[in-house]
Amino acid sequence: MAFDANCSMPAYTFDCLVFIGRFQPAHLGHLAVIREALKQARQVIVLVGSAWQARSLRNPWRFEERQAMIRSGFDDDDNQRLEITPLLDALYNDDVWVRDVQRKVRDLAAPNCSRLPRIGLIGASRGQSSYYLALFPQWESVSVPLVEGISASQIRERLFRSTSSADEYLSTGAYHDLSPGVVDSVSDFCQGDAYSQLLEEQKLLEQYHHAWAQAPYPPIFVTVNAVVVQSGHVLLVQRNAAPGKGLFALPGGFINPHERLLDACMRELRERLRLKVPEPVLKGSLRGQRLFDEPHRSWRGRTLAEAFYFALRPDQQLPRLKPAKGGDHARWVALADLEPDSLFEDHFFIIQNFLGLPADFGT
């Protein structure tokens, strides 16, 4: 979108309005916010979060699919004024995430303007928007009334828990909270392998929850993960079953009832991966540990992960590995080859936290 040198605004209150969301999927409530933004601003920047994460029940659609959903709700003229760009989460570092948002908006908002553009942050009037506003006090706040009765999480729940086929479910008109273009996108998605794999994960999740249904309180699980790095490589296992079939994951697992956290981590490396590094050497390479507790980090529910960072001394050869217990394939992966959408759950962000990788690393 070209701006004149003086950035005159005869018809708009703002030079730019910013709308941040995950759009999983993009529903009529999201589109209503964008339409209001187009009324008030010459340019609208839509930042799509969780853009490079692997598909999951919480994030079924990739960035390109969500971008197409959003654009399908607007005509060519409106789409000319829309900038839709991906945003990588930084789950355990708000400062990194805020810097990424600031840089994207700075680079996209009125680049030819001879004065500072007037920028606002727009969103539905609910708690999540207030959280964003607290992180960007330099931008004005624009609240849009919440469209009642529309929830992306409920849409996903209906889609993946339907007892009939997805096409039949969509054709019933139950998806009155989606635009026709988005209904078409969702219908196409439900014909593919990704949908079938997520349905399998949903069935496993329901079985998991059923097993804990009689517990007096919602269970909280405690796990350990190992971030083992040597000579620019990190030790990962490739999952051979749902959830996250085909994705890479950090070595780890559940702790035993009478086990300390570090002992559980060492056990997983010894038994699961059979890592050929003496235990005293491994313990001597421990450089840090941290609890990772993002509420939505795991598919199974509230799961805390204590991660341990081991930095092995550089060597001409990486330590040998034997096939991982359970059939998962263990391998050393070069840091330059890490991609957020190839890692399970929040494991990319755990690695990012210990190694200080930038927010756009691997994208």
Image (cartoon, rainbow, N blue to C red):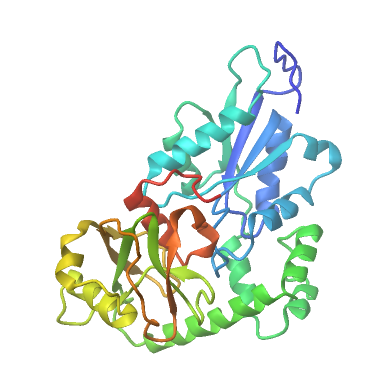
Quick one: which residue is furthest to the front in this view?
316
Towards the viewer: 230 or 212: 230
Residue 328 location in percent, x, y? 44, 80
**Please, is residue 251 above or below residue 25 in the view?**
below
> Looking at the image, which is closer to me, 86 or 207?
86
Total numbered labels placed on residues in the image: 0
Location of residue 251 by image quarter:
bottom left
Between 182 and 242, the residue placed more toward the observer is 242
Q: Residue at x 50, y 43 (%)?
A: 129
Is residue 343 shown above or below 142? below
Q: In this view, does 257 lie to the left or right of 29?
A: left
Image quarter of the N terminus: top right
Q: Which residue lies furthest to the right in this view?
A: 76
Q: Which of 315 and 234 is in front in this view?
A: 315
Residue drawn 72% across the image and 78% down it: 166
Residue at point 37%, 81% (across, down): 322
Taking the spot 36% from the left edge, 46% from the top edge, the residue there is 356
In this view, 303 is above or below 164: above
Does the rendering let one see residue 142? no
